[in-house]
Image: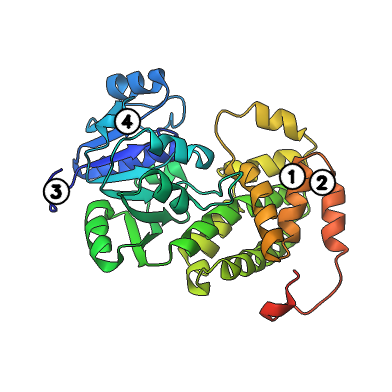
Amino acid sequence: MSSAKNPTIGVIGAGAWGTALAQMLASDGRNVRLWALEPEVIEAVNGDHRNPLYLPSAHLAPQIRATGDLAELAGLDIVLAVTPAQHLGRVLTDMPHFAGDLVICCKGIEAGTGRLMADVARAAAPNAMQAVLSGPTFAHEVAGGLPTAVTLACEGGEEQWDRLSDAIARPEFRPYYSEDLTGAEIGGAVKNVLAIACGVVDGMELGQNARASLIARGYAEMLRFGLAKGAQAETLAGLCGLGDLVLTCSSTSSRNFSLGKALGQGEDPAALMSNRRTVAEGAHTAPVLREVAREIGIEMPIAEAVCALLEGKTRPDEMVDALLARPLRTEVALPEEGDA
């Protein structure tokens, strides 16, 4: 490992988001190691300084070197984990003996266990110090150097924050400190599911009023679920919660919103999922979120509706009708009242 003033950095995952983070980190001339699964991505990044498979719009810095060997990242000081959420545990298990700062940048809940990503990472890389980076971040904008702000939650407190913020912050990429890893993770995971619902509204051309209402009521679901899991309300009202929710629910640059829009236009859920190279994490998170919410007694009708739609158990018009037919009630419920 290098000195604390010049830490070595790597990124696991060369999808659009991982590639964008590598480009951002290399923007000050720093060398960045990028692990990719596909040989053609490794060849293109190293030879042409491009990733035509996942981020074709970006011309990548020559300081980014791609590799298919996870062992090359095991001795680095800081590693950003940007794999699809359902593969994080397996990939980290294959990276031997990492003991640096592990920054979780993927958003989801593990199927079969209901674990958040930091819990998955603790089991797979027990010697690492965990952190979570989350917020309103479209990959192509980060890669293009457009202004972006994120939450950086650190389990090691201010000492870890000092290390990571010095290494990660750039003039156009501004992290804000938090110690609430649970809140940072829940905001990122739940908003992906809600973005599918907002895409359905857009695909059905139900208007801006309907989408704004769905964002607000979806945030209420996120907040209830997060508080029940130990998150802080202030975290969920910040960049990694409400900020990310508003962005993801408002643009076809979001894979989750785009998936929902296609569903709202009548396309078949199974066909949409089978034809996608890039991952709409909300589709994988939705059924896990539903089960965890049921287990802890939290009602999440929007998440439930998204699950039914993805499973082919309801049509978009039926989904909307069911949500509109819910009983009228006070907008702000006390915690013990539940409901949405």
Q: Nearer the viewer, mark 1 or mark 2?
A: 2
Local secondary structure at mark 2: helix
The Cα atoms of the two marked residues, 3 and 4, are separated by 21 Å
Q: Which residue is mark 4?
A: 70
**40 lies left or right of 340:** left
Asked if 127 appears above or below 87 in the picture, the reply is below
The Cα atoms of the two marked residues, 4 and 2, are separated by 42 Å
The Cα atoms of the two marked residues, 1 and 2, are separated by 9 Å
Category of crowding for the residue at label 2, using alpha-carbon neighbours closer than 10 angstroms: few (below 14), some (14–19), many (at least 20): many
Q: Which residue is mark 2?
A: 316
Quadrant for residue 166, please give it: bottom left
Residue 62 appearing in the image: yes
Local secondary structure at mark 4: helix
Q: Earlier in the sequence, mark 1 or mark 4?
A: 4
Quadrant for residue 312, please give it: top right
Residue 252 appearing in the image: no
Category of crowding for the residue at label 3, using alpha-carbon neighbours closer than 10 angstroms: few (below 14), some (14–19), many (at least 20): few
Where residue 6 is drawn, which disc sits there? 3
Q: Nearer the viewer, mark 4 or mark 2?
A: 4
Q: Earlier in the sequence, mark 4 or mark 2?
A: 4
